[in-house]
Image (cartoon, helix red, strand yellow):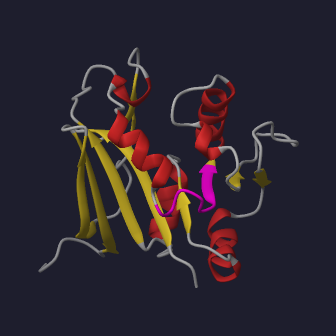
Amino acid sequence: MQNLTIDFICSLDGYGAAEGWPGLWGMGGPEYFEWLGSAPDKDYPILMGATTYRLMSAFAAGGEEGVGVLDAIPKYVFSSTLDEPLAWANSILVRDDAVGYVRQLKEESDSPLRTLGSIALCRALLNAGLVDRYRVVLFPVITGATGQDRIFDGYPDVRLDLVESRTFDGRLQLLEYVPTVLDGPPGR
């Protein structure tokens, strides 16, 4: 069975985006972009929901830096609102139950899987016990007034065991964990 990595970028206060801020909060730098283009999992199939697909496919169509590397990668897009054919190359529309589909995909895929954004999809996959790694790149901003897409709202309690960390461009922090979903606080 293949591994599944949840992959998020977020502000220090847990937002996935912020109104009026540029992509990556204007802080993407050469080390981070080099890592995106050369990471061992850069070619792994990507799972995403409709909202993330709309945003990222628009970035790809507009030539946003760092997004073009995703064009050749298989992308599974879980949506009941999008229509075929999807415009972004190598995108596969999936209307089936995401948890069941991903469970089967983990068994049948030739390579590990990863997500891109897609807060609700990631929450469902984590709750179903399908997530093997949880990777977050923290951007050193607090967007309390303008933040959008709070990532961790509605999540279960999760213990995270750190397995990798790295700093990009002297400011971005990559933190990779093995998650364990808990029934509640430990020791109760």
Q: Position of residue 165 (x, y in %)?
A: 23, 59
Residue situated furthest left in the rendering: 187
The residue sitting at 29% across, 75% down in the picture is 182
Among the 4 quarters of the image, the one containing residue 112: bottom right
Q: Is residue 154 visible?
A: yes
The quarter of the picture where the C terminus appears is bottom left
Q: x, y (%) of residue 161?
A: 23, 72
Q: Between residue 132 and residue 72, name the one nearer to us.
A: 72
**As displayed, is residue 187 above or below residue 126?**
below
Quadrant for the N terminus, please: bottom right
Q: Specify the farthest residue to the right.
A: 85
| Residue 25 shown left or right of residue 116 in the figure | left
For this rendering, which residue is in front, 153 or 130? 130
For residue 94, side relative to residue 31 (left or right): right
Compared with 97, 48 (above or below) is above
Q: Is residue 58 above or below residue 118?
A: above
Q: Nearer the viewer, residue 188 or 102?
A: 102
Position above or below: 24 against 76: above
Q: Majority secondary structure of the magenta segment?
A: loop
- Residue found 45% across the figure and 60% down from its top: 6
Could you tell me how many numbered marks the image carries? 0
Which range of residues does the magenta coloring cover?
40-48
Q: In the image, 135: left or right of 4?
A: left
Residue name at image x 77 percent, y 50 percent: 90
Does the rendering let one see residue 147?
no
68, 136: nearer the viewer: 68
Q: Is residue 68 magenta?
A: no
